[in-house]
Image (spheres, helix red, strand yellow):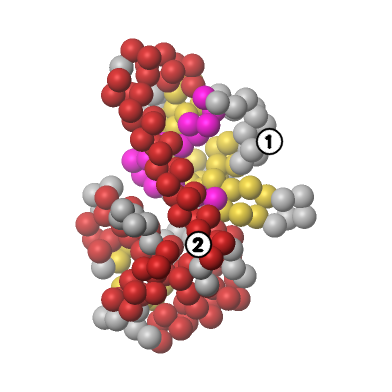
Amino acid sequence: MTPTPQVLQRGEILVQMGEPHEFIYAIETGWLSRSRTLSDGRRQVIVLFLPGEICGIKTIFMTRQPDAIEALTPASARRIHYKEACDLAARDFAVAMLLACQLAQDERHLHNWNVRLGRANGEERLAAFLLELRNRLIALGVTSAETRYGLPLTQQQIADHIGLTTVHVGRLLRRFRELEMVDIRSNEVVFLPNRPLLEEIAKPVQDLVGE
């Protein structure tokens, strides 16, 4: 990876949709998203990337990128040219497994959301989304996420990810708060005493091997 990280501001595009790109990134700080925007302006947030994760691995396999990668917060990432990454993977099994692991995690995430977008109702989607981020952050060492974590997304961005309207997301968040399951305060998710109900709502569409 480059010795000096590339610094991004909120809203800055790391990878342009539809354009050639040749680098893989290791995220050091901040949150990024992979999204695709249709010709009429509709947007789907496909996946969120957190600190410690790798993004842009698809540059190994395709010249032109179908999706954009955007900084949701101020962020920093180191990069490596995909050819250098391939050379490293050919020489070092650990590097090859790291890249394969990230691809497997990406595929698993997409499988989970394929089920949710295709079969889950709004409550299940939102509950699964909030709990998935909690579990991913805990796995990355953010132990405080068990009770609360920062969520630097607008309601529109949440809606673009879970396939609902902004109005619907707002209504669901209000209902979750009234039932004392979870609240979002100043871009922070705070779990409330009735969190087990939130987990019960999400259970039908949670990853069976843990998420």
Q: Are marks 1 and 2 in contact (CB under 8 Å)?
A: no
Which image quarter: residue 64? top right
Quadrant of the rendered structure where residue 16 is? top right
Based on the picture, tell me whether residue 14 belongs to the magenta stretch.
no
The answer to whether residue 57 is magenta is yes
Q: Is residue 150 visible?
A: no
**Residue 58: mark in rendering:** none
Percent position of residue 34, x then y:
54, 45
Residue 193, above or below 8: below
Name the quarter where the C terminus is drawn: bottom left
Residue ID at (61%, 54%): 44
Q: CA separation, marks 1 and 2?
A: 27 Å
Q: Is 186 placed above or below 153 here?
A: below
Q: Give SS at disc 1.
A: loop
Q: How many marks?
A: 2
Left or right for 25, reference 211: right
Residue 18 badge: 1
Based on the displayed image, in which of its 4 quarters is residue 25 positioned? top left
Secondary-structure class at tag 2: helix
Residue 36 image point, x, y percent: 63, 47
Residue lying at 55% horizontally and 26% vertically, measured from the top left: 61
Amino acid at circle 1: Gly
Q: Residue at x 52, y 72 (%)?
A: 121
143 sits left or right of 66 in the view? left
According to the picture, the residue beneath numbered tag 2 turns out to be 116
Magenta highlight range? 46-60
- Image quarter in which the N terminus is found: top left
